[in-house]
Amino acid sequence: MNQKLSYLILLLLIVFSGYTQDIALYEQFNGRYDFTFVGNTLNPAENNPTAACNIYTTSSANLNLDSNDSVVAAYLYWAGSGTGDFDIELNGTPVTAERDFPLSALNTDGLTRNYFSAFADVTAQVQTTGNGVYTVSELDLTAVIQDPLYCNIKTNFGGWAIIVFYYNPNLPLNQVNLYDGLEYVPPFINVILPSLNVIDNEGAKIGFLAWEGDASLAVTETLSINGTPLSNDLNPVNNAFNGTNTVTGSSTMYNMDLDIYDIQDNIAIGDATAEITLQSGQDFVMVNAIVTKLNSQLPDATIEINTITQECNSGSISLDYTVYNVNSTEFLPAGTPIAFYINGDFVAGTTTMGDIPIGDNESGIIIINIPAGTPIDYEILVVVDDVGDGTGGIVTETDETNNSVIINETQHVSPPLQQPEDITVCETDNGTNIGVFDFSEYIESLKNNTTDIVTFHTSLTDAIDNVDAIDNPENYTSNGMNPQTIYVRLENENGCFTTGEFNLIAIDCLFPDGTVSLGDIGKSCNSRVITVQYTINNFNSFDVLPSGTPISIYANGEFLDYTETLLDIAIGGIESGSITLTIPDDVPLDFELSFVVDDIGNGTGIVTEIDETNNNTLIPLSLIVSTDLHEVASVIVCDEGFGIGTFDFSDYEESLKNIPTDMVYFYTTATDANQDSNRIYNTTTFVSTSNPQEIFVRVDNGICYNTTSFLLYTKKCPPTTFNYVTPNNDGYNDTFFVEGLRNIFLNFKMSIYNRWGSLVWTGNHSKEDWNGIANVEKIGPEGNTVPVGTYYFVLELNDPDYPEPIVGWVYVSK
């Protein structure tokens, strides 16, 4: 019964089909290099004969290199059952898989099982740590290992390994190749190892990183190279993968192998490939990495650019180069190609002339045309052992990575020169055509780079030959040629130059300075004709102001008239003149009059002056016209007798003015008003001499005047009676006085009655005022003073304007 069960398990281990990743070349090292392994399993025991369904999550191993060994590369591989754990730690440092190799196997039980391997470059960490303990942790496959899917058929495993490549100067020149992938048996696999260059098979060896090999399973299990089975002290010929480590001599690697075999008798000089065959009748083995070391007697071509020579604007360069064969064990053959690239494009090629012995070199010179359109700054790439297509050469070398050199270069072309502007200054003296010029600022402003050199020359030949440079550009005196051409040379750091030119122009700056001032302006009343006295000055000047210099006159900015200077006006001199102008009717009485010297009537002049901004003089002007007078109202007062009255017309002094500065005068005749004689000064109590009386007014603005008149009238006003009479001859109220009566109402009649209605006194214009004495014999003898008491009067004015009598009372006392 037990025998049948064991046989059933064996049958289940025979893989029917699956998915793998073919093993292929990953990296190659040529030189004094070798390799070693360091690693460990996570399995506590071998899966056979009894599987252990548990696993560790950490394990350690020691790296021991010689003192002369220098690590150049270190690659960490870890693997196990399941789909993978790709985040682990190496000596406590997190590591994440950079590559992975999944594998699936369909067994005869009809179930698919997954396995994995992962890869990470740990070169920097190993170079830093060096020899010592390396511990992989956080590789947790516990759940997978306990799964009956794996444990029941004894393919539960986990482990890790670091493949270390190192340099040692005492080693022969070797070619070390690393191939990786993930392939499995049973029943068998064939792996072709390409890219071999077997020059000498002495010391040749091959190493394997494999998983899940069991020492207790050795059913037709062989590892062969080129048809010859391999074996060593740890690995029998019929049990190649048996949980061993050739580096440490360990046989307890449990389900993983780090095996190294001597193959110098199994590979021939000149071989370019090797065939690895792995056969297993039972054991499920996965090959992860294969490393070969073969002695390599090869040259090592390197190249150096010694000098680069080029002419300005030539479009070509000359390269002086040297090809070396230093780190080599074989001569570099004649005809080794050399390719030249500009900005990545192949532009020229050549070859070495003879065999270059070990440690020797060969120099050469080549002229390269720079392609049109190449930028000023460009890159030269020179590659030895390159036929011009960038894919490599025809010579196998110790190091295929050191064949090139890159140089950043700049085309030697003439620098761009910005056209310098001409420079204009004043002559040193009239008519000399000589000036003192400063063009020193061009020394910096014309540069494209701070290293550029700018020089100035008086001839183009001198500028091209770079001789006789002007040494005082900050105060250079021109040679009398006007204009004089100055030639500029702009040279860059490569010696390339460009020439240009500009002119020095000396101009006459000794100019006059015409200004104008205005004098008296003659104006007439009610006239638009004025006469203007003016003076043309040439004060702030260095030359005469020529005769015929135009003078234009404007009214409110509109051209009015034109005149000219009569003679040359000397420096500091003047010329006076007078011009009569008629101001057009459309120009208002108040306007701006301006005289502009050196103006032909449109704002432009004909004379060059020191100051072109001071030619204008402008003044406000008013034409003189007589004052407009409105009708003046008559003045009426009460008649004071015989048609005479007292008048106040002083308020007319202000009301008749048109402007505050006008003067208003009054006269009794028109002749006096026109001649301004016999003015009336008493305008507040003027007593008229007739009724009506005409008063004449003169409104004078200082230049023009106008006259008008108004009438003084008197009128009969109602009389005013007083009510008290004291006939005692004391001079106060001795008579009954009625104001505004006598000499006004010539036909009046006054009647006075006592309180009983008896007539006491009558009077008219021919009689004196009543003095309290009766003149009618009614209450006593005539001529007697009436008794004290109240009396009544009736005043009849006998005037059409006052038809009704005035009735009132008066009191008589002693």
Image (spheres, rainbow, N blue to C red):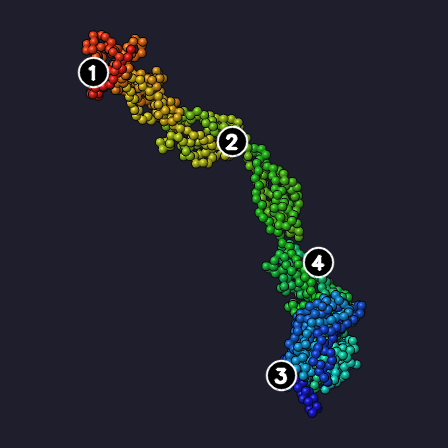
Label 2, residues with CA under 10 Å away: few <14, some 14-19, many ≥20: many
Q: Nearer the viewer, residue 49 or 811?
A: 811
Would you place residue 387 above or below residue 755 in this image? below
Q: Nearer the viewer, residue 54 or 571?
A: 54
Label 4, residues with CA under 10 Å away: few <14, some 14-19, many ≥20: few
Disc number lying in front (4 or 3): 3
Cα–Cα span, label 2 and label 1: 109 Å
Cβ–Cβ under 8 Å for marks 4 and 3: no
Disc number lying in front (3 or 1): 1
Element under disc 4: strand
Q: Which mark is residue 756?
A: 1
Residue 192: image location, x then y, percent: 69, 79
Cβ–Cβ under 8 Å for marks 2 and 1: no
Residue 49: image location, x then y, percent: 73, 85
First in residue order: circle 4 vs circle 3: 3
Element under disc 3: loop
Cα–Cα span, label 4 and label 2: 68 Å
Cα–Cα span, label 4 and label 3: 70 Å
Residue beneath disc 4: 307
Cα–Cα span, label 4 and label 1: 162 Å
